[in-house]
Image (spheres, grey):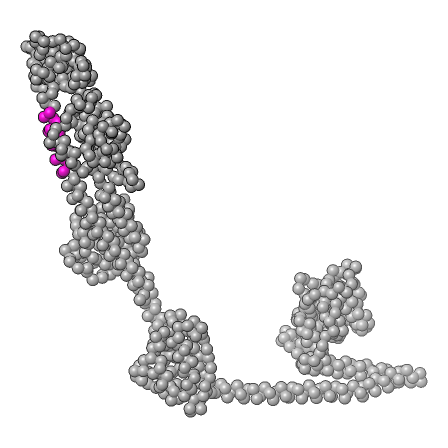
Amino acid sequence: MAEADIAFAAAAGAAGLALAVSVWAWRLKRIVTLRDQGQQQARDRLTGVLAQAISARSAFDDIRIGFPPEGAPVVLGDEAVIAAAHTALVGTGDGAGEDLAGALATLVHSRFADRISALAADGTPFRVLDVGDGPDGDTGAWAVEGGSWGGDVWVRLFRDIGRAAPAAHRPDVGLGAGVIADASPAPAWVLDSAGKLIWANRAWLAEVRCTSLDEALASATSFDRGADQLAAEAGRAGTRQEGFRWTAAEGRRRAWKILAEPIAGAGGPVMLFALDVTEAEETRDTLRRHVEAHDETLNHLADAVAIFGPSRRLAFHNTAFQTLFNIDPAWLDERPTHAELLDRLRQRRMLPEVVDYAGWKANELEFYGAAEAAPDDSWSLPDGRTLRVVRQPHPLGGILLLFSDITGELSLRSRFNAQLQVQTATLDKLNDAVAVFGSDGRLRLHNEAFEQFWSLSGEQLEAAGEFDAVAELCKTALPDVALWLGLKARVADPDPESRVAVSGEGRTTDGRVAAWQTRPLPDGATLVAFSDVTARRDLEQALAQREAALSESQALKREFVGSVSYELRTPLTTIVGYSELLESMEDLPERSRQHAGAIRVAAGQLAHSIDDVLDMAQIDAGEMELSLGDVTVRDLFAAAVRTHRPRIEGRGAVLKAVAAANLPAIRGDSRRLAQALDHLLDNAGRSVSEGGVVSLRAEANDTEVRIRVEDTGRGIPYHLQAHVFDRFVKRERGGPGVGLALVKALVELHGGWAEVESEPGKGAAFILHLPLEMAGATAEPEVEPELAVG
């Protein structure tokens, strides 16, 4: 499976998971909502019953006094209540036989004249608490409040139940309402205007862990401070207040919805209800986390995701969607419709270019009525990108769209197919027989040379299919059981130690030599190649025989040269000896003496040439051994100057030698290095003419010492410079010889190399590069800054 297909499958799986979570969250939210609605309805019914009961009770326990613009005041109320109110305001119980109603109206008007006048003038209500206490522990404090209705001024006197002290005289909340509230599983309680507890049901007492109401009153127990503040706000405003609080009890956090309902208007008692919404809040929190995880999962997808609700408006989009189409995030947050999104994309040339856009758009919007997922579609955008589009119905209504940029995938697939065709064509043009077997052992491909090598047809190989069957077909030509078992291990064994490149050879039944090799491929396949190397092996055998004959002839040549050289040294010694004897005779004529000297010089040159030939033969045989030591460059130069100065100056030339004082010592054979230097100076001396200069210089760096022998002679032609170090090659600067070849060989024995620089007509320079290796402790320190000879 391609990487893009895997990524698409992962995206589809994640989207499916997200849809399942969304459906589950929707159902859970619906259940919670229905439960909240049921609890709310029960609370409303309970609140109505309690409010009606308490209001009906309070209606017969207060006094209303009307002050019309004209006429006497109107007093409404029970006579006993009027007498109690008169007694409370006057402060004495002596009121029998009087017109208590009129007296009470006059008393109230006199005590609250300013407030009543303001109420009559501009309708300003008032409320005064604690206007009097009855004697002998009477029913408690009284309160006065004033209001207007229809142009009339009314004043109400009522007992302030919030200031009632003895429990025996607390106002009853009503028998029916009290029974209902006490049986309610939700905590309910009443606070007076000062925020003190008046009444509470059993659920409230159980929640605050009190056994009775008296215990709660004695300990001033509070359900929650936030609830108390909510009750104070409800009592001050005279309207219902709602809040949400978390409490901790018995190691568990619980969520409560607090309802504060004023009982007798502003400034009066407040009844509170606490509805346990812990499960709903935990469910809501779980749903929120699932939604966040769903969104986070989709935001991490590389594919673009867009969800449109039943109203065809954008309900969700991930980050990849905004990036893919490069749309303003603020515009997407406005939840555009599907049609508006298509129009915006068309304006920005982000949709396929079609002739009938209206029809194409209508076709896109028809998917909202589909019951099943539509087949995958592809969009070819004007900017060259290709998008894969997947449309799926959403479980909550609407559709879900997935967009994948498959431009790279298509390009890669095209390149892969082209590469595969190139590889197939390349294999067919190879002379080697090539077959590729997959990790399952089946034959994937082979070239024409494979069929020809084994004399098989393509149909036979296709019918065989796997390695064992192909091997059976090939065993008729190469019946080597061990070979085919080894190849099978390389093809079918997944062990990395078995999947290594191996090679070998075998001989077929028709006399051919077949070379084979295996190569493990990156995709787990194995390449097996066979080639006919019969002609190559025959040629290699012939070359080996010829090389052996050549080596034998070289050995015979070296032996012959050595033998001849040794044979020539004996007569040369005799010639040199007799020539020196002739030169020492006093009665020998001068001309004869010169002839004898010429014979001696020629014999010496011939002896040197023979020594060079012997040295070359010894080097070729690998028998020359160096006597290594610390060689000082200045000592080499001094000995060379002493030897070659007379001959060079005899030609009218000058010899100069310069060596820095701080040159390091060379680890080498001083005799062989001096021999190489002698050959170079001898060569320079032959080429320099009268008035010329032969210079000998040395310089060093961190790794080597370079010795430069330079002359101002006629130089070396360019076409001969490449062969100047060859042995027995005719050169313009002398006849055939081995001098320069021996120099090169001696330097190479020391691990160095030699080079030549020359410009015809301007002289030549030979440079020897000698490695330093390790300088010995016996090297003498240089004390002079330079050595100059000449």
Q: Quadrant of the C terminus?
A: bottom right
Q: Position of residue 558 (x, y in %)?
A: 69, 86
Residue 362 is drawn in which quadrant?
Answer: bottom left
Residue at 70% in and 63% down: 699
Q: Position of residue 193 (x, y in %)?
A: 21, 24
Which residue occupies the extreme right position in the image? 587
Residue 54 falls inside the magenta stretch: yes
For this rendering, which residue is in front, 412 or 43?
A: 43
Relative height, residue 316 to residue 239 (above, below): below
Segment tinted magenta in the rendering: 41-57
Which residue occupies the extreme left position in the image? 71
Residue at 66% in and 64% down: 703
Residue 515 is drawn in which quadrant?
Answer: bottom left
Relative height, residue 741 to residue 575 (above, below): above
Relative height, residue 550 to residue 407 (above, below): below
Q: Quadrant of the N terminus?
A: bottom left
Is residue 733 in sight in this rendering?
Answer: no
Residue 587 falls inside the magenta stretch: no
Residue at 22% in and 43% down: 280
Relative height, residue 752 to residue 514 (above, below): above
Is residue 750 in sight in this rendering?
Answer: yes
For this rendering, which residue is in front, 202 or 383?
A: 202
Residue 159 is drawn in which quadrant?
Answer: top left
Most common SS among magenta residues: helix
For this rendering, which residue is in front, 610 or 47?
A: 47
Question: Is 469 positioned to the left or the right of 716 in the image?
Answer: left
Question: Is 210 positioned to the left or the right of 741 in the image?
Answer: left
Q: Position of residue 35 (x, y in %)?
A: 17, 43
